[in-house]
Image (tube, rainbow, N blue to C red):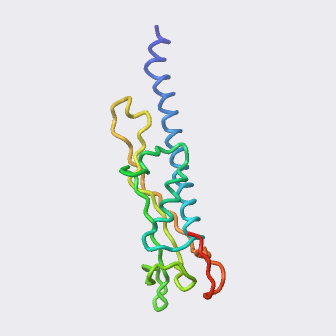
Amino acid sequence: MEFALLYGGIILPLTFGLVYVAEMYWVWHSMVEFTRDGARYAATHCYQTDTQNVISYMQTHIPTNIDLAQFQSGGTAEISVVYQQIDPTTGILGPVACDGACSTDCVPDAVTVSVTNYEFRRFVGYLHLPPIVMPGFPTSMPVESNGCNGDNASVTCSP
């Protein structure tokens, strides 16, 4: 009788709690790698003002352990991409000043990719608990090549 009470009241909930926390940390790590991958893509591909090329790439390369429905149309999770340029007078990063056409004349200096409003919903639905809103996952990187090859006369840029 003592074992049944101990097992049902302490050991079993502790085991499920440990599995829940481990899965949450696994998803946390996956989100960090997801934003790093998006920032790498943005740093090496063509700058576009609507940033749709980076968002499309990220939506098609979501890790398998993340809830895909939150990242597709109508989902709660949001992917944001912000390009920055260094102001020559102050040396501070600010918004990009060029028109956004993919060329060697318009190369931002840095990019920040972040995922916000992602909710960890696994297992809490069974207990009728609210989902855990994960913090934002921003990743910043310097822009390396803007995805353009060649000189201004014949430039090929990868979207």
Residue 41 vs residue 10: left or right? right
> Closer to the camera, 58 or 66?
58
> Closer to the camera, 120 or 70?
70
The residue at the point 46 percent across, 43 percent down is 67
Identify the residue at the far right of this view. 150
Identify the residue at the far front of this view. 154
- The vertical placement of 87 against 119, above or below, is below
Residue 146 vs residue 92: left or right? right
Measured as percent of width and height from the top left, residue 109 is found at 53, 79
Q: How many marks?
A: 0
Measured as percent of width and height from the top left, residue 105 is found at 54, 86
The residue at the point 41 percent across, 50 percent down is 118
Measured as percent of width and height from the top left, residue 133 is found at 38, 48
Hey, which quadrant is residue 121 in on the image? top left
Hey, which quadrant is residue 26 in on the image? top right
Identify the residue at the far top of this view. 1
